[in-house]
């Protein structure tokens, strides 16, 4: 992968100032450094100690594994209204929300009136194409779901298994680049091996499609681990940089690249957009998805596709029992139990 450049950065704003960015859109005006497109290790100084912010490597996942990941997982970034601050401020003029009567709207969450005139029990977020596969700990909300394979893993179990070489490659890159963090995460994952994605240190993968995240920190993942992100793209687009606004750093992660990053720092994405040249190219492509235009999910009606895969270990997965309810397993006879995650 070549010798990386070393970049040492400073905080451009205090923690208190950066906390105010939660749920807000971040653009290129937050960048102090040129957008990163080459191999680099980025560190920052805190209390006199050098800490790792991210490691980025280009073109390190083969085209054959990219094809495997696309074939297996391209349809699994399902609509979700539960992505919290990362889904951004509620857009009352969006196609999705204009069909509904909103109540108690605040920042990135809102209630709404159901057809019977009652207010929804849950406050939800903008609907985006983002969905977890793999394993999840017990739900604490009204669903009261146990530790399990997620719904879309169970109902697409064969595809999930066929794509594992792609996920295993991501885990091996993590092991190579940040071995100490990898070993800590693997040790934690091995406490519940039946809830670990085979031959990885991950329990879960979040798949996003054309999802521009607002400023957020990842919640619920292993506190001593790193987020592992890779991209599969189809067609042409610009933007979508992964930005750490407190440090002025942005990364242009594209197909075949790998980004290990401290997801417990504030991060976001810049807008995705097409140039005129991009549009001409993309219009020539056959559709890759069968989307219902009436749904109003953000980002899924573009001709280009940017799938991001964020691989991690759920912190509370180690609290799960040593066996899980067979109804929530894949293998033969997929469960058809519906769930919110």
Image (tube, grey):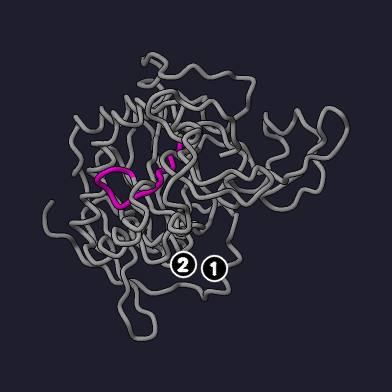
Is 101 drawn above or below residue 230 in the view shown?
above
> Nearest the camera: 77 or 49?
77
Q: Magenta region: which residues? A: 197-208
- For the C terminus, the quadrant is top right
Q: Which residue is mark 1?
A: 18
Q: Is residue 87 left or right of residue 41?
A: right
Q: Quadrant of residue 135?
A: top left
Residue at image x 29%, y 41%? Answer: 167
Task: Determine if residue 181 is in view.
Answer: yes
Disc 1, SS: helix
Q: At which x and y percent is residue 281?
A: 35, 21
Q: Are marks 1 and 2 in contact (CB under 8 Å)?
A: yes
Residue 299 on the magenta span = no
Q: Quadrant of residue 308?
A: top left
Residue at image x 30%, y 78%? Answer: 50
Q: Which mark is residue 246?
A: 2
| Mark with earlier residue (1, 2) | 1
Task: Determine if residue 235 is in view.
Answer: no
Q: At which x and y percent is residue 146?
A: 55, 45
> Nearest the camera: 4 or 277?
4
The alpha-carbon separation of the residues under discs 1 and 2 comes to 6 Å
Disc 2, SS: loop
């Amino acid at each position: 992968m070549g010798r990386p450049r070393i970049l040492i950065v400073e905080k451009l704003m205090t923690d208190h100032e950066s906390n105010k960015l939660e749920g807000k859109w971040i653009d290129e005006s937050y960048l102090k450094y040129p957008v990163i497109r080459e191999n680099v290790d980025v560190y920052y100084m805190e209390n006199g100690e050098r800490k790792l912010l991210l490691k980025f490597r280009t073109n390190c996942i083969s085209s054959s594994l990219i094809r495997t990941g696309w074939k297996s997982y391209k349809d699994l970034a399902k609509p979700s209204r539960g992505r919290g601050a990362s889904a951004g401020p509620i857009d009352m003029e969006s196609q999705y929300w204009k069909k509904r009567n909103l109540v108690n709207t605040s920042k990135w969450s809102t209630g709404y009136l159901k057809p019977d005139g009652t207010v929804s029990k849950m406050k939800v977020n903008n609907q985006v194409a983002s969905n977890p596969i793999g394993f999840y700990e017990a739900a604490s909300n009204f669903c009261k779901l146990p530790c399990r394979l997620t719904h879309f893993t169970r109902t697409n179990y064969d595809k999930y298994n066929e794509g594992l070489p792609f996920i295993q490659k991501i885990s091996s890159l993590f092991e190579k680049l940040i071995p100490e963090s990898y070993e800590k995460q693997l040790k934690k994952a091995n406490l519940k091996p039946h809830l670990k994605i085979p031959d990885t240190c991950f329990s879960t993968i979040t798949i996003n499609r054309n999802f521009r995240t607002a400023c957020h920190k990842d919640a619920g993942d292993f506190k001593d681990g790193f987020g592992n992100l890779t991209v599969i793209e189809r067609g042409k687009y610009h933007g979508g940089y992964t930005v750490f606004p407190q440090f002025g750093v942005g990364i242009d992660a594209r197909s075949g690249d790998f980004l290990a990053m401290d997801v417990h720092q504030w991060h976001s994405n810049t807008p995705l957009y097409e140039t005129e040249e991009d549009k001409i190219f993309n219009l020539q492509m056959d559709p890759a998805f069968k989307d219902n235009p009436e749904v109003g999910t953000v980002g899924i009606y573009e001709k280009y596709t940017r799938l991001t895969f964020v691989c991690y270990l759920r912190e509370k997965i180690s609290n799960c029992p040593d066996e899980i309810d067979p109804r929530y397993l894949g293998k033969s006879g997929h469960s058809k139990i519906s769930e919110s995650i």
